[in-house]
Image (tube, rainbow, N blue to C red):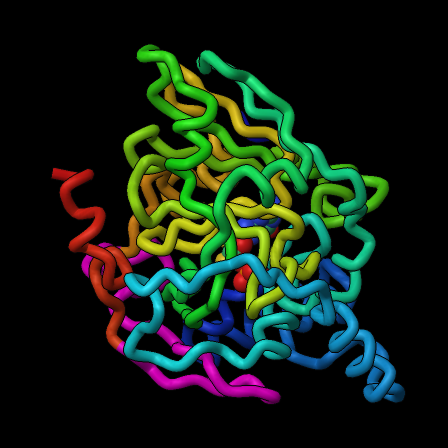
Amino acid sequence: MNLIRIPKSWEISEGEVTSERAYFNRRSFIKSIVSASIGASSLALTGCESNKSESQKALEKSVNLPKIKSAVKNPDFARVDRPIADELLAARYNNFYEFGRTKNIWLKAQNLPTQNWQVEVTGLVNNPRTYDLDDLKREFPLEERIYRFRCVEAWSMVLPWIGFPMKALIAAVEPKSSAKYVRFTSFYDKEITKGPGVVFGPLPWPYHEGLRIEEMANELAFFAVGIYGHDLPKQHGAPLRMVVPWKYGFKGAKSIVKIEFLSSQPATYWNTIDAREYDFEANVNPDKPHPRWSQAREKFISKGPNLTWEIKETLPYNGYGEYVADLYV
Ligand code: MTE
């Protein structure tokens, strides 16, 4: 029995996918339980309206990061039939619940401590190892891939990631034959993140996600260490995050500190909160509505500086069926 009400995972963003009336009802409910700054899912640069130019400078600084010169453009993923999102818009329209429940977390996310980052790769592997970020960047050839990105909330973007295929890590650590699943765990320190876990109670932190090992070995599955030609900004999940473009965006855990090869399916963050709304597989599927909204279409966001979108049809597997459909027959 649930003694404590866990908030529905996407209730703030639901405004973007439900009718205006439902939206404002939801908004007034939220306003009654949290402060206005948490309830407002807007693109205001910060809560500080009076000093936008300072905010703008801070936002620009958050993406002004070292270029990754060694990355080669992968010709198989050099373009999609939609424009790449405006960089500063993508940098202030994020989901990173450790830092709050709105899209506007970029400033709080700057508290993420990314110095001396280590990623432990463990579990059912012949070569367990703890990598630091430089090891990863040196040992795995980096490439740029332009991928579609589709959030379960029915918005989408196109983003130019830099990183390496997950299958390269699989080859390095040599999973045992008993390894069937992989769990990816995000950084969490409630003193630093002060996200909804602190405000609302016992959400299942740290954020954790999982894949079947065959999914992780798929050509598309990618670890990103960069975006837009440079290191990954904190709000996008620095310094290492998952990118699995045929799945809803919540499968892409940010700021990963641990990767474990397991014999059975791990629990995952959203699936633990509400399994009916967020299944483990979470493949983009226009024919399978979310219990609270349709997934047939999406708000495609590309241009800045203000939030605008075009409505587009959602494609099965987010347009990547030729790579992944075989995994699901
Ligand atoms: N990873 C962590 N650790 N915490 C999160 O809240 N949100 C997920 C995913 N990874 C999330 C996360 C969701 S719901 C989405 S849509 C994407 O990150 C958003 O990635 P972006 O902010 O880089 O666009």
Residue segment shown in magenta: 285-312
Q: Furthest-left residue in view?
A: 329
- Asked whether, in this view, residue 115 is left or right of residue 170, the answer is right
Residue that appears at 58% across and 58% down: 226
Q: Residue at x 76, y 46 (%)?
A: 114
Residue in the foreground of this view, choosing between 190 and 242: 242
Residue located 25% across and 56% down the image: 317
Relative image position of residue 16 (x, y in whole percent): 48, 73
Name the side, left or right, on which 15 lies relative to 37: left
Residue 80 sits inside the magenta stretch: no
- Please check the rendered image and state whether residue 305 is part of the magenta-colored stretch, yes or no: yes
Q: Is residue 9 above or below residue 131?
A: below
The image quadrant in which ligand 1 is located: bottom right
Q: Is residue 79 depicted above or below 1 in this figure?
A: below
Quadrant position of residue 130: top right
**Where residue 122 appears, x then y in whole percent?**
55, 19
